[in-house]
Image: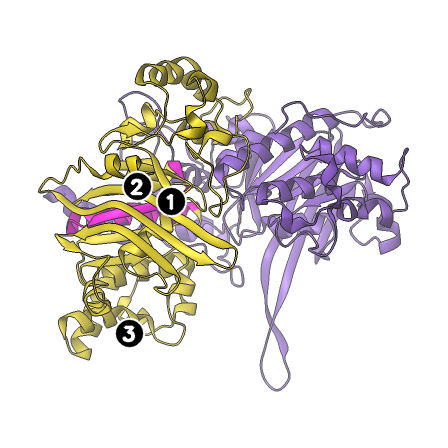
Amino acid sequence: MTTLTKTEDAPAPAGPESFLSVRDLSVRFSTEDGVVKAVDGLSFDVERGKTLGIVGESGSGKSVTNLTILGLHNPRTTTIDGEIILEGKELVTATEKEMEKLRGNKAAMIFQDPLTALSPYYTVGRQIAEPFMKHTGASKKAGWERAVEMLGKVGIPNPKERAKDYPHQFSGGMRQRAMIAMALICDPDLLIADEPTTALDVTVQAQILDLLKDLQREFGTAIVFITHDLGVIADMADDIMVMYAGSAVERGTTNEVLRSPQHPYTWGLLNSMPRLDSDLSAALSPIPGTPPSLLNVPSGCRFHPRCTFQDRVGGNRCVTERPLLAPDRSSACHLTADQKRTIFVEEIKPSLG
Amino acid sequence: MKEDLVLPAPREAATDSPGEPLLQVEGLVKHFPVKGGFPIRRTVGAVQAVDGIDLSVHVGESFGLVGESGCGKSTTGRLITRLMEPTGGKISYRGKDITRASRKQLAPVRSEIQMIFQDPYSSLNPRQTVGKIISGPMEINGIEPEGGRDKRVRELLETVGLNPEHFNRFPHEFSGGQRQRIGVARALALNPKLIVADEPVSALDVSIQAQVVNLLQKVQKELGIAFLFIAHDLAVVRHFSQRVAVMYLGKIIEVGDRDSIYTRPRHPYTHALLSAVPEVNLGDGETGGRERIRLAGDVPSPINPPSGCRFRTRCWKAQDKCAAEEPPLIQISGNREGHLTACHFPEEPTIEARDEDIVLDPALAALEEAAAED
């Protein structure tokens, strides 16, 4: 474990453009059943105006990571190690007061289910105006006007009237637009979108994704986009990080990760996902087994119990030694770079059709 | 997971010839009353969940039903299994009208039509063991298979890729994917002829989805069971179904064989739906040449659906005729046999990119125009 920590956080590509940087982050929850290692030794960077896509299945730690960035975890049961640096400011050790100043102002979040994220008790306009009034000290009137302007911008028809409505009077897609308006009202530098379209229909999802992209172009916001859908990530992200059981297993640009993936888990994800143009005569090839419990994570490589390429590594390194993930384009796997390339080209790519 | 599934011996050779409809639905209607008023609550309207649909499922065929939430696809599934009473129309199973059949008359049919539900957490009784859950259908129907029910349960567990020794465990001891397998085993317990699968994989993780889809496909092919496969995921439906129907606001707007629907769609809504699916482009370099259509707003309320063609409020081709006249579901010239479309002004049968994207969303259009000017 110690060796891992050192190697993982050592060569930080902390260029001047790196705007959010997470270093060796670990998040543990104590529960009745024991300690849940939700995130373990995670490092990544997000550049200004760029989108980082985090893909992973449920329980891979992708949401926890981002709740931690905004300090939205329960401090009594959570232990956090590592560093989160947003524009040179350390967030793990920041006080609640400092975090309050940052949330909704410099960094904002959009959640999966807009109905539970909006309060049923206040009008949509008032809720959208609230962060603006809090952070800029604007008057109620100015806040309301700004809220109406934002609602118009995200495509709510007749925003002046609709701002007076309550969330239940909005449809699912409109609620998500209202959430986006609320998140962007203070013109944040960082937007965390946690599965923002998972609850929406596909035609509405397409509208919201395009809206986010267009707004990002206009505002220059950095986005951390969390999803389990590789199709959505391909559409949205500049860079991709694939997570499995609390740590990153592969990262690179969207093109690199999707066109020449190097980790057996990423291969598995691509192979198990039916596409609109995939070959119909072939059966899908699922990843065997199930994701591990985070109470009791496998030793060595966390993916080894489900990995079909273990025997090519030799010895039982996969079981004993945890593979490392280098900062730039890389994958955390003991297979050699040549092996990864040949396996992908010869065995995986043909079956993707 | 075991790759080779052990399958129970197929039962007596099916008497139906393939191709003959197993299930026939005509003009099926389900309206849910909307109550209002005080002090006497009167029916003030109706949610027109399903409003006159025709479909047929043949022996051993997999028929896919796609659409967005609120289009009535799940209600259709529940009407066919008679878990809900239809308001109108006719459902016949093997030529026998079961629309108004009593509980008693339905019993033999019910054992041949089974259902798999979306949520593997709420569709299994937490207080029963897996063995009890799977043998439940046999118990209710008084069926005593050869070798006893326990043996059959073990066989079924093996068929769906679970350890037969686990029949004494409770549902909470299994993961989501394994629970869905238990649901499949229960559906198979009575050797059904038709399984209505309502979003069977949408609650599962991506890597588990494929396991369950493969299992269902195996079951469908090797036991010759017909499926009515209801899902919102177009790629999964394409993978699983030979014929596909697209629903919108309680109506089937297009139906046809898989290739026709996915590569030669004619209805504007089908075009919009297909173009909205986010896709991983695995090709090298060139961006996929798919058309881009972005509709405005959400699906209208089924309480007060638009007159005429129900899609017209979100359609870029809508004209006066669309509001006045409901388009019939017919075979449009140039379409293959069995490919029916309900549209007055159908689109070209291609999903290739158009000269100009169709962007109806006002916010998107404004932002993109501003970006183009820069």
Q: Residues within 10 Å of mark 3 (few under 14, many from 20)?
A: many
Q: Which residue is mark 3?
A: A126
Q: Which of the labelled discs sits on residue A53, or is there none?
A: 2
Amino acid of disc 1: Thr
User: Residue B278 occupies which quadrant of the picture?
Assistant: top left
**Among the two numbered marks 3 and 1 on one chain, the one whose residue lies closer to the N terminus:** 3
Report the magenta residues as a range.
Answer: A202-230
Q: Which residue is mark 1?
A: A227
Name the one closer to the observer, B88 or B163.
B163
Please check the rendered image and state whether residue B313 is part of the magenta-colored stretch, yes or no: no
Residue B270 position, x and y percent, is 46, 39
Chain coloured yellow in this rendering? A
Q: Residue at x 63, y 24 (%)?
A: B3
Residue A153 position, x and y percent, is 23, 58
**Among the two numbered marks 1 and 2 on one chain, the one whose residue lies closer to the N terminus:** 2
Q: Residue at x 29, y 60 (%)?
A: A71
Q: Is residue A163 above or below residue B188?
A: below
Colour assignment, chain B: purple
The answer to whether the residue labelled 1 contacts the one labelled 2, judged by CB atoms less than 8 Å apart, is yes
Q: Is residue B259 visible?
A: yes
Mark 3 → mark 1, Cα distance in angstroms: 29 Å
